[in-house]
Image: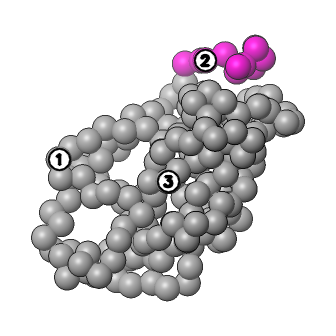
Amino acid sequence: MFTDPLMAPETESSLLVSGEQILMQTALVDTLNLNTSKKQSTTLLLDCGSPRTYITEDLVNKLQLVSNNTEILTVFTFGSTKPKEFKTPVVEFGLKLKNGHTMNIQANVVPKITGMIQRASINSKQFEPFLKDHQLADTLPSELEVSTVELLIRNDYYSELILPERKSIYNFHQVQSFNGGPTK
């Protein structure tokens, strides 16, 4: 999909933090091609600090989405001294909500959003009283899993998806979402 030489991979510095566990707001969702019947389940990452929504080339191909526009992204990568510019296609697709509605989303297409993400197992027994009355927007891994993120949702969609209800248990904070359950 990318023919722009600015999108060519490069070697960059990276930061690896070991021994810490971070809970990210993720949800398992159905994405839809608004013009066809193509549907694909994927994991999204809610990022209240992102000014843009990103979708991977792989998910775009699975949904057979067609770009309706292009934009130039200016990106400062970690540890770099000057920004890089990327010309990216923009696509529109649907996000199927648990209430039956479809939310239209516009996203910049990128080769990859994150590297492989490890999802550590969580002892769900400590959350049983909470979980019996609530459906989570994503699964709780029972063993170490490795996965990818194919969709990152920006701040303005974030505020439309997350409801004001909030609960805390064992220093974990749960917020209610339009995707049918709390994000973790």
- Which mark, residue 143? 1
The residue depicted at 55 percent of the width and 84 percent of the height is 164
- Dot 3 lies on which element? strand
Eye-nearest disc, 3 or 2: 3
Query: Is label 3 in contact with label 2 (beta carbons under 8 Å)?
Result: no
**In the figure, 118 relative to 26: above or below?**
above
The residue depicted at 15 percent of the width and 63 percent of the height is 123
The residue depicted at 86 percent of the width and 36 percent of the height is 69
Residue type for callout 1: Glu
The residue depicted at 23 percent of the width and 78 percent of the height is 132
Query: Is label 1 in contact with label 2 (beta carbons under 8 Å)?
Result: no
In space, the residues marked 3 and 2 are separated at their CA atoms by 29 Å
Residue 155: x and y, percent? 66, 62
Whichever of labels 1 and 2 marks the residue nearer the N terminus, that label is 2
For label 3, the residue is 29
Residue type for callout 2: Pro
Is 90 inside the magenta-drawn segment? Answer: no
**In the figure, 139 relative to 65: above or below?**
below
For label 2, the residue is 9
